[in-house]
Every structure is written in C-alpha cells, then in structure tokens.
Image (cartoon, rainbow, N blue to C red):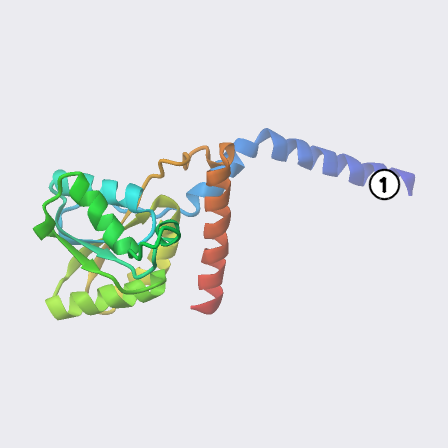
Amino acid sequence: MKRKFWTILLVFALLAALLFGFRYKLLAFSANMLIHTDELVPVDYAFVLSGGAKDRGAYASELYNMGYVQDLVCTGANLSPDLESYGIDLAESHLTKMQMEALGIPSDHISVLALGTSTLEESELILAFCMVNKLKKIAVISSLFHTRRLAMVFLKKFHEEGIEVRIYGAASTQYSEVTWWESEAGLIALNNEYIKLFYYWIKY
C-alpha cells in the first residue's frame, strides 16, 4: 500500500514538474487556440465589429491605407458604458467611425450599421448587407482573441451563400497576445473569450 502511494505521488510530482517546465508554451498555446486570421488580400468592403473601437479602428485604417480595403462599415448598436455615465448615448459603431476619421480615413469611405448587440446578430446584418449589395468577398475585423469565434459564426453561413469571408484580427494595445498572462487585461480577455467560445459552441 505504501509503495503504491509513493508511486502515485511520484507520478503527480513528475507531471507537475513537466507542466511547470512547459508552462509558457502551454499558456501561449491557449492564446493561439483563440486566433484564426487569414492572409491579407484586397477586398471592396471590410466590416469592423463593435467593441474595441481604438484597436479595431486603427487596424482597419491601416488596412485601408495599405490598399487592402476600399470601403469600411462599422457595426454594432451597443452603447459605450463609459460615455453613458456622462449622459452621452453613442453606439460603439459610431465610436469606431470617429476613430478612423481621426486617423485620416475619408468619411465617404466609412459607413455605419448601428445595429446588432452580439457577434451573431452582427453576422446576420452583414450577411443581409452582402446579399443586397451582391458582395462576393469581404473582410471582417475584430480583436485577435475573437477571431476563432468569428470563424465559427461567419464562415459556413457565408460560404453557403457564395460569399468569401477573410478574417483579420487587431492586436490589443492593453496587453500582448503573446504574453497575455503578464497583465490583468490579458487574463480577463482570454478568460472572457473562452467563456464566449464555449457558449457559442453549446448554443449555436
């Protein structure tokens, strides 16, 4: 009995040592599992999803300036809670537009769809927009940690309608996706995205 106990203890100790030794690789792997991005190719329209107006707006502006995007569409009806505390009712889609205008993107190349309160709702709105405007290739921009869930929500549905979707991820300025565990913001972002990914997998 004693021998069995010490054998089990030794196995657990070795396992713990291995996990500790490879902890950084495992932490990085957990982040990589959330990321699904495509090679940059020119598209007529890129849709910038709501939330993270600063990072997503800046990345969308960069793609526009590099010639990968001709027109930008900001989506989302959610109001910014920080601005609401000042009595300002401004949808996140408008904040993204303002961010891109501040970076020099011409207003006539930015549209707003101030509708949708979730990734799923925004995907339905974007699909309807594509169908009406007969678009066959688009880009969808969100935060890097959101891109795996975007692939889950967008790719099959749009493919069935003959629409190619390129998924691009904007890096965060609050934390590094490579070493996310070194900041509270990174820890929260990764944790929240895994919860959302699991929720979408169960529900949809």
Element marked by disc 1:
helix
Whole-percent x and y of residue 81?
39, 53
Whole-percent x and y of residue 75?
25, 58
The local crowd at label 1, few if under 14, some if 14 to 19, many if 20 or more residues have their Cα within 10 Å, is few
Compare residues 36 and 92 and report the one nearer the observer.
92
At a point 13% along the width and 43% down the height, the residue shown is 105
The N terminus - image quarter: top right
Whether residue 71 sits left or right of residue 183 in the image: it is left
Whole-percent x and y of residue 148?
38, 52
Determine the image quadrant of residue 90.
bottom left
Looking at the image, the residue that sits furthest to the front is 87
Whole-percent x and y of residue 72?
16, 52
Looking at the image, the residue that sits furthest to the top is 21
Compare residues 162 and 170 and report the one nearer the observer.
170
Picture layout, residue 200 above or below residue 105: below
Whether residue 145 sits left or right of residue 138 in the image: it is right
Picture layout, residue 17 above or below residue 87: above
The three-letter amino acid code for the residue at tag 1 is: Phe
Determine the image quadrant of residue 128.
bottom left
Count the labels in the image.
Answer: 1
At a point 13% along the width and 63% down the height, the residue shown is 135
At a point 11% along the width and 66% down the height, the residue shown is 133
Q: Is residue 105 visible?
A: yes
The C terminus - image quarter: bottom left
Whether residue 8 sits left or right of residue 98 in the image: it is right
Q: Mark 1 — residue?
A: 5
